[in-house]
Amino acid sequence: MQLLAILLAYSLERSVTLSRNLHWRRIVLRWQQWQVKKTQMGSDSQEKIAEWRQHLIGEVVWAVLPALIVTFVVVLVDSFLLSFVIGVLALLASMQCGQARAAYKAYLEAANSGDTGATAEQLRQIRRAAGCHEAAPVHDLLLWIHLRYYFAPLLYYVLFGIFGVLVYATLRDMKNPRNQAWSQLQLVVHWLPTRMMSFGFLMVGNFGKALPVWLSSVGNTPQNNFEALSKVANAAEQLEPSHDDDITSTALTTVALMKRNLLFFIVLLAVMTIAGWF
């Protein structure tokens, strides 16, 4: 069932445009805004909840309540068809990154036409979609977007089902404080998807060159997921531009690498399903 849900979700994501109100990001934000309004009403229970939410653990637990409710309903009904449909919808709602896709297409068009101003602007849009606040090359940004919106939802759905993908999407998209504890939480959430996705690069790229880099990313600290993913990808495939004017081939090469990587894991999941391991 998981394999069919993943294949259907990835197919629909390319052809069906969900309303913004159905994006899990919007659902989580509405939930948080509703809770803020309830707190402002001043009841004793809401004030206690507000105090509890001042801590990161309380904020996270409160944010994942919608995911818990959806999972509880699916388990309570105990229907194969409902689980399949909700699984597809959960993946679709978690994978929506239309802003990044539109910015990437516009980036290629601007670069091919030689419009440096438009190219720089679209690169800023890609950086915003990736959630990065520091300058980074386009291929690193595309890798991170793919991890956050495609690979990580797939991995957490395979490991933990509907609850896993919705909790991940919640932690990825919820409004959060910029503090050390939150940074550590994001590090933990993205640690496994980063290592698994970069492991795929070994299988579809230069294994001998990328393996030492991947092993280093697994064992060494501090472990920056963004940098670890970029280093392994650059070792598995030549992503750096051959000259300064070459600003599109590196992006196209990165996208091709990510497609091969995703296909590898789909085939791996299919083999494991046939073998009865899922």
Image: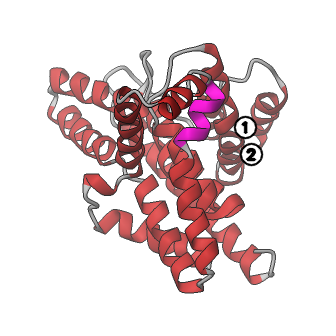
Residue for badge 1: 210
Image spot of residue 69 (x, y percent): 55, 59
Quadrant for the C terminus in the image = bottom right
Q: Taking 269 as reference, is 61 above or below it? A: above
Horizontal arrangement in the rendering, residue 14 relative to residue 110 (left or right): right
| Residue 133 seen in the figure | yes
Q: Taking 39 as reference, is 7 above or below it? A: below
Task: Name the secondary structure under disc 2.
Answer: helix
Residue located 58% across and 79% down the image: 77
Q: Which one is in front, 78 or 81?
A: 78
| Residue 2 seen in the figure | no
Query: Mark 2 packing: few (<14 Cα in 10 Å), some, or many (20+)?
Result: some
The type of residue carrying mark 1 is Ala
Horizontal arrangement in the rendering, residue 105 relative to residue 235 (left or right): left
Image spot of residue 15 (x, y percent): 29, 68
Residue located 45% across and 38% down the image: 173
Residue for badge 2: 207
Q: Residue furthest front?
A: 44
- The stretch in magenta equals 56-63
Horizontal arrangement in the rendering, residue 197 relative to residue 239 (left or right): right
Quadrant for the N terminus in the image = bottom right
Image spot of residue 168 (x, y percent): 58, 46
Magenta: predominant secondary structure element? helix
Residue located 62% across and 22% down the image: 55
Mark pair 2, 1: CA separation: 5 Å
- Choose top left, top right, bottom left or bottom right for residue 266: bottom right
In reply to whether residue 269 is colored magenta, the answer given is no
